[in-house]
Structures are given as C-alpha cells and as structure tokens.
Image: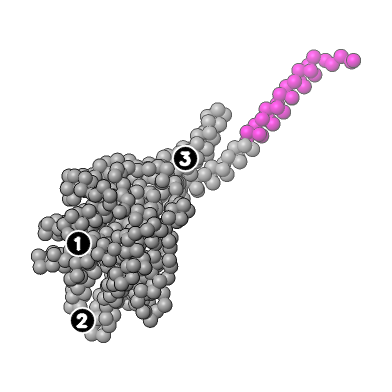
C-alpha cells in the first residue's frame, strides 16, 4: 500500500472532524427546530387549559368546572413532565434560547392550573368538618342517634369523600334495583312537553317515602330528562325513596329575548306552582301504584326548581310536606335581579305588558319570593328545610340561601345550610364530585332524621 504523507493524513482527520461537528450541529439545530414547534404547541395547550380552569371556572360560564379537577389534572401534569424533559435537553446542550424560557413559562402556568384544580380538595376536610358541626348545631348534637335503627331508607352514617366513587358513574347494577317509568302524565297541559314526569321506584316490596324533584334552568329552560336529573333520581331511589322527576310550565324564552320581561299578562310562575301542586296530588292519588307513603312526601329542587319547591311548600295549608330540599335556590326575587344587574349588567323588567305600571315590579317580587312567607303567622306551615350553596356561585348569589336560612332560624324553624367555599352554581352536576358527595350524603342523613322525628311526634 502506498504511503500517504503525514500532513495529508492530518488534514483528512481535521476535515473528518469538521464534517462530524457540522453534522452534529445540524442534528442539534434540526432537533431545536422541531422542539421550537413543539414548544409553541405546548404553550398553546397550556394557555387554553389555564383559561378554561382558572378564569372561566370562576364565571357563570364554568359553573361546574370546579368539581372535575382530578379528571383533568393529568393534562397540566403531563405538560409539566414533558416540559421538564425538554428543559433538561436545553441545559445539557447549553442552549438557552427563547424556547428554553417558553418551557419555563409552560411549567409555571400548569403549576397554577393544578393548584386551581385541587382547590376543592384543599377545602374538603375543613368543609366536611364544618358541615358536620352545622348538622349537629341545627338538628341536635345527637341527631344521628335519633334516626330509627329500622328506618326504611338508607343513609350515610359517616360522611367522607370517597375517591373511588369520584371516578365512578351511577352504575348499571343500581338500575337493576329500581323500576324506571318515563313520561307519565300527571296533569293535562296544552303544550305536550309539560305535565309529564319520570318515576324511579325501588323494586323491593313495601311503601316508600316520596321525593318530588324539580329541575332548574332559570324558569325558562330544563327538563326532567337531563342526564343529571336521571342520576339524582337513581341515587335517591337506591336510598329507598320513590322519586318523581317532573316537567313544569316554563316561561317562553321569546319574552326574555324580545323585552326581558318575566311577567306578562299573568305570571307564568303561578302556573309553575300549580303544576307542582298537581304533581303532589298525583303522587298522593296514585300512592298504591307507585309504592308511596302518601303522608311522607318531600320536595327537592335545584336553582329555579329550589325556588318553586320552597314557595309551594310555604304556601300550602295542608301541612302534608315532610321536608324541603333546595340546592342554591332563589329565595328573594328582588335581590336576584339586583345581583344580575350589578354583577352581569343584565336588567330584567318585571312589569305588566299591558299597563306598564312599574308598581307591578314590587308586587311581583313579594308575591313570588319564598322569604316573604317566613312570618309568625305562617311559620306553622313551613316544614324542615335543607339548603346547600356554593360560595362562588355566579348565577344565584349565595346570600339568597343565607338570608332565608337566617330568617328561618329567627323564627325557630328547623333548617340546615351547607356552604361549599370552592363551589360554583350547579356543582352537583358532577354528582360524585367533592361537592356532590358531601351534599348528598348529608342530605341522606337529613331525610332519615326528618322521617324518624316526624314518626315519633305523630
């Protein structure tokens, strides 16, 4: 083999080294370009998740987002891990470009998002303890001991958050224990979608206490067939109640879109109260068919439905309602309209469309505000009340529940109010969320306690 001069060998080594370095730099540069685009994607996802679960979750748009933190926490957590891995590459290559600082921003944004998602769980233990103290303070220190041992319904003897239940829906096997009957006509209505109910009846033999349930929706929206209402019906039926989830007359939405008027020639709210009254009578008249104790009837409503069950029970003279459950209910119309005007810059005129008399507004407020009926003369008609509200409610001011509760206590009326510091409106849409679990478990105790104490007093 021909000898190659030394200087040529040296030159070839240098050139090869140069080519290797160039190739290496090209690979690094190519990888950095790819990482640049990945960083843009990660930043975009981080910003969207942050906006959704931080500012939006505190508004009237993100009403139930506070309850799903553990479901969605995997997204910001994976973004943090991905960003840290890529940060390690930049540190190793000593390349501190704009992408490096973008990744730092991604980590910080997602840390804030995770903290927001976990806020309910930071409050959970203290809120549970406070709720337990409230139950003891307003029902009696030994209220659980007052519940009969052979009570016909189930209830949670101890209330604690169950992580396993958090990830589970209402299971199929629960449906096997109940009979579901849909679209039962309880009153003749001109409009086909009103005047019907869904029934959830335990399959076992016997008679059961009844719960008549009313959906929310601001008196203009909502249906008995929403999946949330079906879950509530199944949950309560599995506790041993015959549950009747009713549709009722709603205010035509065009009256809001055109002139933002709640009151027309005659108030539709009066028809809503009449519908609930007819539903109560239907349950009593058909108690044998639906396995109901006609003298053991509870009313349960969410939001606008909470307003209607409170109003109807306060107006009834029959004293045939054992108890009323209102989740974040409207209790004072004037205060609610003022809240919307101040917080959301929305004004609803409550006036007669024919006469335009402004005096009709105050008359309407008083006529359909449950709090107006908590009086010395009417206190004998008011059954035990269970209220629950979120302190971050942006649709119904939590003061609505607080004011009614305070007035009920002033007249010595049996009532309980549970307050969730983190919760927004309709927190119980996630029925197994932190708010849903606490409220429904304490509710099961309240219902069982009322059944027991009413039986002893009769």
**Residue 279 location (% of width, % of height):** 31, 71
Label disc, if present, on residue 77 of the rendered structure: 3
> Residue 427 colored magenta?
no
**Residue 352 location (% of width, % of height):** 25, 81
> Residue 10 colored magenta?
yes
The answer to whether mark 2 and mark 1 are in CB contact below 8 A is no
Quarter assignment of residue 125: top left
Asked whether residue 292 is in view, the answer is: yes
Give the residue furthest to the right: 1
Q: 172 above or below 309?
A: above
Give the residue furthest to the bottom: 354
Viewer-nearest of discs 2 and 1: 1
> What's the residue at 34%, 45% (across, down)?
120
Q: Secondary structure at mark 1?
A: loop
Quadrant location, the C terminus? bottom left
Viewer-nearest of discs 1 and 3: 1
Left-right relation of 226 to 13? left
Q: Earlier in the sequence, mark 2 or mark 1?
A: 2
C-alpha gap between disc 2 and disc 1: 36 Å
Asked whether residue 276 is in view, the answer is: no
Q: 442 above or below 262?
A: above
Q: Secondary structure at mark 2?
A: loop
Q: Residues within 10 Å of mark 1 (few under 14, many from 20)?
A: many
**Which stretch did the figure color magenta?**
1-29
Give the residue furthest to the front: 205
Q: Which residue is label 2 attached to?
A: 357
Q: Which residue is label 1 attached to?
A: 383
Q: Nearer the viewer, residue 183 or 18?
A: 183
């Amino acid at each position: 083999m021909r000898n190659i001069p030394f200087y040529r060998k040296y030159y070839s080594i240098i050139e090869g080294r140069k080519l290797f370095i160039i190739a290496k730099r090209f690979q690094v540069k190519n990888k950095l370009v790819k990482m640049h685009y990945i960083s843009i994607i990660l930043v975009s996802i981080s910003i969207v998740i942050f906006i959704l679960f931080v500012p939006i979750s505190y508004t009237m748009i993100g009403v139930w987002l506070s309850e799903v933190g553990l479901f969605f926490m995997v997204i910001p957590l994976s973004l943090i891990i991905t960003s840290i891995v890529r940060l390690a590459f930049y540190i190793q290559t000593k390349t501190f470009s704009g992408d490096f600082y973008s990744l730092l921003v991604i980590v910080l944004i997602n840390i804030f998002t995770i903290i927001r998602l976990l806020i309910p769980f930071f409050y959970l233990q203290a809120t549970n303890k406070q709720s337990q103290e409230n139950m003891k303070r307003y029902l009696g220190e030994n209220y659980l001991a007052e519940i009969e041992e052979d009570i016909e319904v189930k209830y949670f003897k101890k209330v604690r958050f169950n992580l396993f239940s958090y990830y589970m829906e209402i299971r199929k096997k629960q449906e096997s224990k109940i009979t579901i009957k849909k679209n039962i006509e309880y009153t003749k209505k001109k409009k086909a979608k009103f005047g019907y109910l869904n029934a959830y009846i335990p399959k076992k033999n016997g008679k059961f206490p009844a719960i008549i349930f009313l959906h929310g929706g601001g008196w203009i929206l909502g249906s008995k067939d929403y999946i949330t209402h079906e879950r509530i019906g199944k949950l309560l039926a599995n506790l041993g109640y015959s549950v009747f989830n009713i549709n009722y007359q709603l205010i035509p939405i065009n009256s809001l879109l055109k002139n933002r008027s709640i009151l027309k020639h005659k108030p539709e709210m009066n028809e809503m109260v009449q519908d609930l009254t007819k539903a109560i009578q239907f349950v009593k008249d058909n108690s044998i068919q639906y396995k109901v104790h006609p003298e053991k009837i509870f009313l349960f409503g969410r939001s606008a439905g909470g307003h209607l069950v409170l109003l109807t029970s306060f107006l009834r003279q029959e004293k045939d309602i054992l108890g009323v459950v209102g989740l974040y209910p409207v209790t004072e119309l004037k205060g609610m309209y003022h809240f919307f005007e101040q917080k959301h810059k929305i004004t609803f005129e409550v006036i007669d469309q024919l006469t335009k008399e402004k005096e009709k507004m105050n008359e309407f407020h008083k006529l359909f505000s449950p709090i107006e009926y908590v009086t010395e003369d009417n206190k004998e008609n008011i059954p035990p009340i269970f209220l629950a509200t979120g302190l971050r409610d942006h649709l119904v001011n939590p003061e609505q529940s607080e004011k009614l509760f305070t007035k009920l206590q002033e007249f010595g009326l049996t009532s309980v109010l549970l307050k969730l510091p983190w919760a927004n409106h309709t927190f119980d849409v996630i029925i197994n969320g932190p708010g849903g679990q606490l409220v429904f478990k304490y509710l099961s105790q309240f219902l069982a306690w009322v059944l027991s104490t009413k039986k002893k007093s009769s």
